[in-house]
Amino acid sequence: MGSTIFAIVLLVLGISFVASTIKIVPQGYQFTVERFGKFTRILPPGISFLVPFIDTVGRKISMMEAVFDVQRQEVITRDNAMVSCDAVVFTQVYDAAKAAYEVENLRLAISNLVLTNLRTVVGSLELDEVLSQRDQINSKLLQTIDAATSPWGIKVVRIEIKDITPPANLLEAMARQMKAERDKRAEITEAEGSRAAAILRAEGLKQSTILEAEARKEAAYRDAEARERSAEAEANATTMVSEAIAKGDVQAINYFLAQKYIEAFGKLATSPQQKTLIVPADFSGIAGTVEGIKSLLDKGDK
């Protein structure tokens, strides 16, 4: 009976010895070792050995990146607008000893740091800047919080503002302002379209006027050229008749008189005041005159 109890006691002591001597650290963690309550060293991932009954494991620190939310809070901007905002923080321990012994309740400390600095950063900006410069707010918070947590062995990887919510009355005012701005842009666009259409119409009218003037110019030029040629032909005919008359050609005299006779008779026939056309009694003599003109022209051609 006594030997059995001794064996059990010995077995318990052996298990306790092994448990206090051999320590297995999971991947992603580091353990602190304390000797009589004082920190001595860090156990890395894997198997490690301690001095039995003297060394003990102090804190088990996760070296993996941690994510936690910062509670929503009300913040007053520089232009006295009340906004509600919250954030999310990404941290990672790079010094397990400092994270274990430099600060109590590490997560609560970081959360309070973010809250106070969030009030400071947002309070230094106006509402429009808060809503439009979220990246700048994140950068300022990250720089400030990372510098504050560095003595704790913590690296703040990034801070993101999750949501910024203005009061309901400001949201309504912003909606009305946005609608007014859209209406303004629509009116400006419509006015610019009308202006462009008016310019195009004026340009078309201008081109039409220019083309019409050029057409009139071309027609006048053609008319002048025709009159010039007609006058030249008339002058040549007159010269020819004058030379024939000078030579004593009776047919030339008849041509000249017949031409004037026909012109006068044509004006009489086309007069708008003339209702009755009087044909001369010696109208048959005109035919003979025409035959004389033809003979004269034939001579001129020869």
Image (tube, rainbow, N blue to C red):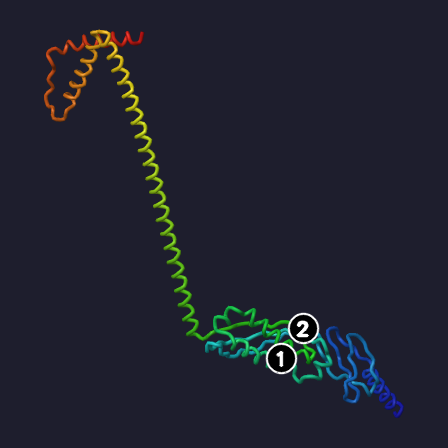
Q: Quadrant of the image for the N terminus?
A: bottom right
Q: Farthest residue toward the front?
A: 246
Q: Is residue 196 left or right of residue 82?
A: left
Q: Quadrant of residue 135?
A: bottom right
Q: CA distance from mark 2 to mark 1?
A: 14 Å
| Badge 2 amino acid | Glu
Residue 228 image point, x, y percent: 29, 23
Q: Quadrant of the image for the C terminus?
A: top left
Residue 173 image point, x, y percent: 41, 71
Q: Is residue 223 left or right of residue 44?
A: left
Q: Quadrant of residue 11?
A: bottom right
Mark closer to the chain start, 2 or 1: 2
Q: Is residue 120 left or right of residue 149?
A: left
SS for dot 1: helix
Q: Which residue is mark 2?
A: 65
| Badge 1 amino acid | Ile
Which numbered dot is residue 110?
A: 1
Q: Farthest residue toward the bottom?
A: 2
In the image, residue 273 above or below residue 46: above
